[in-house]
Amino acid sequence: MDLNHRPLACEASALTTELTAPNYLYSILSNPRCKGQDALYGKRHHCYHIGDITQGVKLSIAKQLYILQGIDLDLETKGERLRIVEAQLSDSRVLLKIRAEVEKKQQQLAELQREQRAAEWEIDDIQARITQTEEKLYGGSLRNPKDLLNLEKEIKGYRGQLRNKEDALLEIMSQVEAIQQEIAEKSERARQLEEEWHRKQQQLIGEQAELNAGLAIGKRQRDELAATIDPASLQLYEALRVRKQGQAVAKVAQGRCQGCHLTLTVDELQQARMEELVQCSNCDRILCQI
Ligand SMILES: [Zn+2]
């Protein structure tokens, strides 16, 4: 059966979908075109069950390599995404940063509270001294005007100290209030970030599992397909893949190589049409006539 002319509606043409679908389909035309647009494109492109190919349905080497390239590019994309996902999975820097900020503010608060208690004790102390001195002053036991004057001066001095200490205490208390407010806000932010982080981690874990499964399937499919291709062609493909950033095979469209977009010679076009393994004389890519 000539698969090139088999009118097959594409059920799952995007390669990512194909790799996880029960019946693997590979489109050798551009994948995004036909996704979900079977009615429009179903008859215009050709899909192949991977099983058809591995079970002996003959496709040209160029087409097999083109399909292989699709799998390879997909594996590469998935592998790259997996690396990003795994890096994000172990990244909790944002959380650590906000937790450290909260901790620092809590230390500052504890220090201020110590200062506050010390100021309160000093105030109690001064007040006690004032009471004591006033008792002496008004107790009636002292008669000497000079002694009485000295006591009055002493009390005045204590009252001055008391005012200063009370001002300092008020200042500390307002700082305590401000820092408590900051801690409350930062703690709330930390809580939200933690929630977000856990949610994101769950997503990433799910994505990681999906990618790993997709990669395993893709690698198996790649091996199966590669096993049907002769070693020399495979070697050529691998070498070009390295040199051409993964694009070793180029489609032929409107007489041009879609790799370098230059017009092909009559010979090249004919060879591609005859499904011979031919490379573009300009960019060296393997030409695939679809
Ligand atoms: Zn070219």
Image: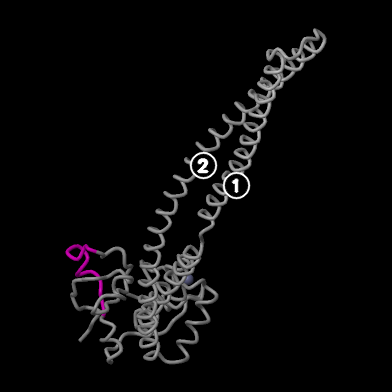
Q: Is residue 178 left or right of residue 169?
A: left
Q: Is residue 196 above or below residue 214?
A: above
Q: Residue at x 60, y 38 (%)?
A: 113
Instruction: Point out which mark residue 183 bears.
Output: 2
Q: Residue at x 54, y 47 (%)?
A: 102
Q: Earlier in the sequence, mark 2 or mark 1?
A: 1
Q: Amino acid at mark 1?
A: Lys
Q: Residues within 10 Å of mark 1 (few under 14, many from 20)?
A: few
Q: Nearer the viewer, residue 85 or 106?
A: 106
Q: Residues within 10 Å of mark 2 (few under 14, many from 20)?
A: some
> CA gap, disc 2 to disc 1?
10 Å
Instruction: Point out which mark residue 104 bears.
Output: 1
Please identify the residue farthest to the front as the structure is shown.
Answer: 141
Q: Is residue 224 left or right of residue 89?
A: left
Q: Where residue 75 sits: x, y (%)?
A: 42, 74
Q: Where residue 169 sits: x, y (%)?
A: 62, 28
Q: Is residue 204 above or below residue 18?
A: above
Residue 45 colored magenta?
A: yes
Instruction: Look at the numbered disc 2 and give the secondary structure of its residue.
Output: helix
Mark 2: is the Cβ under 8 angstroms from ligand 1? no
Q: Which residues are magenta?
A: 36-48
Quarter holding residue 290: bottom left
Please identify the residue farthest to the top as the structure is shown.
Answer: 145
Q: Is residue 228 left or right of residue 232?
A: left
Q: Nearer the viewer, residue 51 or 160?
A: 160
Q: Residue at x 49, y 84 (%)?
A: 236
Q: Where residue 123 sits: x, y (%)?
A: 65, 27
Q: How is the image coloured?
A: one colour
